[in-house]
Image (spheres, helix red, strand yellow):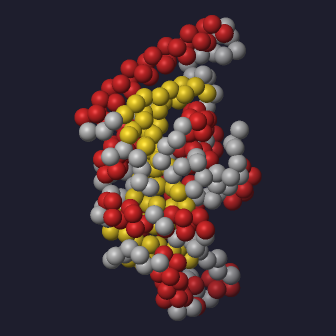
């Protein structure tokens, strides 16, 4: 921060157009330069096994020309908003790799992109471009869910798990609050697994067995966050972290969730998953992730 150079990943879907709205909104706050990036993937629309090299190259050239024309139209939107912009193409086998390779070669402060919020079998089968990018990107990633409201950042939620990654995200709170004149809420979710004997006895909550835990955690939360944001709110809840975070965001009309990401490697990701990635998939608003992956995905 501040986000002076913003890149927007454009696949020309409705999600991407909404992401561009957010990029322009953020860009007007920081007077940013906006780059419109499209990944030209060389598996779409052509039978690679059957096509000759020249046919394949011709296909990519046609795809690139079409993308440039679309990007020029979108660039005019940025210009009308009073911001400078440029357009970029990046070729690769997969869209996420095209984006990550571009980020490795160029210097940006923030990437904004849409997410389709795939879940279940479809997500397992196809993966998620947005989630791969947020896992490995060397810069903050702002993902805009297809259910997000129109661009505007009046209320910001910072989920806190007391980790170093969480601390990095929390450190952005004062600047974001000042830049967008936003109400800030810090939220800690106590994730508990009760012993079956407790459930048999009718106990459903750790807060029932330890009534003072909420106050103790609230005090720790204020200490961890530093109380540097005027009029900030501090909330402690209990349950599954990603579910509580998304439900809190929906119930309190949150416009932006800001989270740290642990950057799991592939094996850790398969075994453990990621609260951040689950929030990105289900959030009713934009999600800004701070942090980057620990190793090259390729």
Residue at position x 31%, y 59% from top?
180
Q: Residue 40: horizontal and vertical position, in percent? A: 54, 25
Q: Nearer the viewer, residue 1 or 49?
A: 1
Q: Is residue 152 shown left or right of residue 94?
A: left
Q: Nearer the viewer, residue 39 or 242?
A: 39
Q: Is residue 191 visible?
A: yes
Q: Is residue 41 shown left or right of residue 11?
A: right
Q: Is residue 95 shown left or right of residue 187?
A: right
Q: Residue 266: horizontal and vertical position, in percent? A: 72, 49
Q: Quadrant of the N terminus?
A: bottom left
Quick check: 72 above or below 250?
Answer: above
Residue at position x 63%, y 40% from top?
125
Quick check: 74 above or below 27?
Answer: above
Quick check: 155 above or below 196?
Answer: above
Q: Residue 200: horizontal and vertical position, in percent? A: 64, 84
Q: Residue 67: horizontal and vertical position, in percent? A: 44, 22
Residue at position x 55%, y 61% from top?
260
């Amino acid at each position: 921060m501040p986000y002076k150079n913003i890149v927007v990943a454009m696949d020309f879907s409705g999600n991407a157009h909404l992401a561009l709205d957010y990029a322009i909104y953020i860009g007007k706050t920081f007077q940013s330069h906006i780059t419109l990036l499209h990944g030209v993937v060389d598996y779409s629309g052509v039978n690679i096994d059957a096509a000759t090299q020249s046919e394949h190259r011709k296909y990519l050239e046609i795809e690139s020309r079409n993308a440039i024309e679309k990007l020029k139209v979108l660039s005019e939107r940025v210009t009308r908003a009073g911001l400078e912009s440029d357009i970029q193409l990046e070729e690769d086998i997969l869209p996420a790799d095209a984006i990550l390779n571009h980020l490795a070669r160029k210097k940006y402060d923030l990437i904004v992109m849409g997410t389709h919020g795939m879940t279940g079998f479809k997500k397992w089968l196809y993966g998620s471009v947005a989630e791969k990018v947020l896992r490995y990107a060397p810069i903050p990633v702002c993902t805009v869910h297809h259910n997000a409201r129109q661009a505007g950042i009046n209320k910001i939620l910072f989920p806190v798990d007391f980790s170093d990654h969480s601390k990095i995200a929390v450190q952005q709170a004062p600047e974001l609050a000042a830049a967008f004149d936003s109400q800030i809420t810090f939220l800690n979710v106590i994730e508990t697994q009760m012993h079956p004997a407790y459930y048999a006895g009718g106990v459903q909550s750790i807060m029932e067995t330890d009534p003072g835990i909420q106050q103790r955690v609230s005090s720790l939360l204020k200490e961890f966050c530093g109380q540097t944001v005027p009029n900030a709110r501090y909330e402690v809840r209990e349950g599954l972290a990603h579910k509580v975070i998304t439900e809190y965001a929906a119930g309190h009309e949150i416009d932006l969730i800001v989270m740290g990401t642990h950057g799991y490697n592939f094996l850790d990701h398969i075994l453990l998953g990621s609260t951040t990635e689950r929030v990105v998939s289900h959030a009713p608003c934009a999600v800004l992730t701070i942090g980057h992956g620990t190793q090259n995905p390729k």
